[in-house]
Amino acid sequence: DGLKLSGSVDRILQKLEDAESKSKDSVHLLASVDAVKRRMESARDTLKEASGMAELMESVEQVFAGTDLKLMASTLSRMRRGLQVVGSVPEFKYGRERVAALEDRLEAVVSPALSEALTSHNTEKAKELRDLLVAIGRYSAVELQYTSGRLQPLMSLWEQYDGGIGGGG
């Protein structure tokens, strides 16, 4: 009886090992299929992004022909994100330069208005304009306008103080 039981256990163990081996093979196959699926989904997403970028590139001049600064900034932000995905596609070879030029155009419109808002202490307008420049990655323009707006009054105070000390002594 012991020999039969031992033989039965050995056969069961062998069947389990065979099933485990088949399961491992199935798992490896599924992992390979999943990797292919992920690459195909990535390619699909890139193609969708490229299609969207092509539409944006065509319509951006219409956006800039208008007066909606928020729409301009939003469009440029979307274009920048899209170029990160499809930047290597030959169709968008000059996309980064075009976006940079459009950002320069928007900055040229927004910066003087931001300077005026800061000078006139119009906080809400200054925040709105600041947000537009930040949305297109132009932090330095915000800093420049802020420091320029603050520097002149400080220089005037300094000159008055300096003149008062030098003139009185």
Image (cartoon, rainbow, N blue to C red):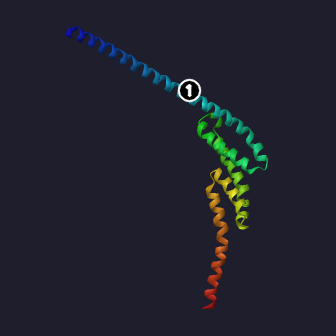
* Quarter of the C terminus within the rendering: bottom right
In which image quadrant can residue 45 be found?
A: top right
Spot occupied by residue 8 in the image (x, y as percentages of width and height)? 27, 10
Which residue is farthest bottom? 169
Which residue is farthest left? 2
- Please determine whether, in this image, residue 78 is positioned above or below residue 28: below
In which image quadrant can residue 157 be found?
A: bottom right
Front position in the image: 98 or 65:
65
* Quarter of the N terminus within the rendering: top left
Q: Which amino acid, by three-letter code, is at mark 1? A: Met
Q: Residue at x 24, y 11 (%)?
A: 5
Spot occupied by residue 136 in the image (x, y as percentages of width and height)? 65, 50
Q: Residue at x 57, y 28 (%)?
A: 41
Front position in the image: 97 or 5:
5
Residue holding disc 1: 40
Q: Residue at x 66, y 42 (%)?
A: 79
Front position in the image: 88 or 20:
20
Secondary structure beneath dot 1 equals: helix
- Please determine whether, in this image, residue 43 is positioned above or below residue 161: above
Q: Is residue 139 left or right of residue 2?
A: right
- Please determine whether, in this image, residue 51 is positioned above or below residue 167: above
Spot occupied by residue 153 in the image (x, y as percentages of width and height)? 67, 73
